[in-house]
Amino acid sequence: MTFLIGAVVYIGRERLLPLLARRSIAYVSIGLGFFALFFVSQDWGVPQNPWLYSFAVWLLSAGVIGLFLRFASGENRFVRFLSDGSYWLYLIHLPLVFFFLVIGSEAKLSAIANVTMTTLATLVIAYASYKLFVRSTFIGALLNGRRYPFTAKGEPSTPQ
């Protein structure tokens, strides 16, 4: 189903992508609301509907794509770094997410606190490891098609 929707958006991209950009803030807001409702209902012991979680994921995905189309369509070094590191994040996120969810669960954190902690810790570790161990190595070239030399913060980094 996800592939089909992606294909439809790609085929109708001239009409659909501007729509995503215009409605991005609403999609993200509603998606976050559904996520909060889903996780809070877990804390309250209310049975969850899996469609609620799925709908939240769809809205957030559409909203984030729209936000980037709307606010980050020009060249930006920070956005380039996030974009280049995203595949690395995808590759390593699952064990990190499981690890931090277990830590938060054992610490008896609320669902919202656990998800927030898990998300932030996963992002920090994934992007730090990308910067330190991947971006300027052959793995970075393998993942992104180019290798960036390792530079200190603030120095320009040009692809090799």
Image: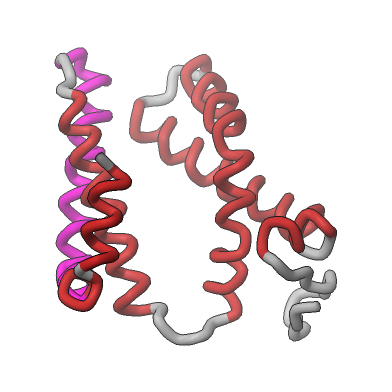
Residue at the (48%, 42%) spot, across then down:
119
For this view, does 65 lie left or right of residue 95?
left
| Residue at 41% in and 35% down | 115
Tell me how many marks there are: 0
Residue bounds of the magenta highlight: 18-46
Say which residue appears at 22% left-offset and 58% top-offset.
8
The quarter in which the N terminus is drawn is: top left
> Relative to 45, does residue 85 appear above or below in the rendering?
below
Q: Relative to residue 110, is residue 99 drawn left or right? A: right
Q: Residue 47 in the image: x percent, y percent?
A: 16, 15
- The secondary structure that most of the magenta stretch takes on is helix
Question: In this rendering, would 45 be left or right of 72?
Answer: left
The x, y position of residue 94, in whole percent, is: 55, 32
Name the residue nearer the viewer: 107 or 119: 119
Magenta stretch: includes residue 26: yes
Q: Residue 20's quadrant in the figure?
A: bottom left
Give the image location of residue 129, x and y in percent. Answer: 73, 50
Residue at 34 percent across and 34 percent down: it is 112
Q: Indicate whether 158 appears above or below 94.
A: below
Q: Nearer the viewer, residue 93 or 17?
A: 17
Residue 63's image quarter? Answer: bottom left
Query: Between 104 and 134, which is closer to the camera in this rendering?
Result: 134
Question: Is residue 53 covered in magenta?
Answer: no
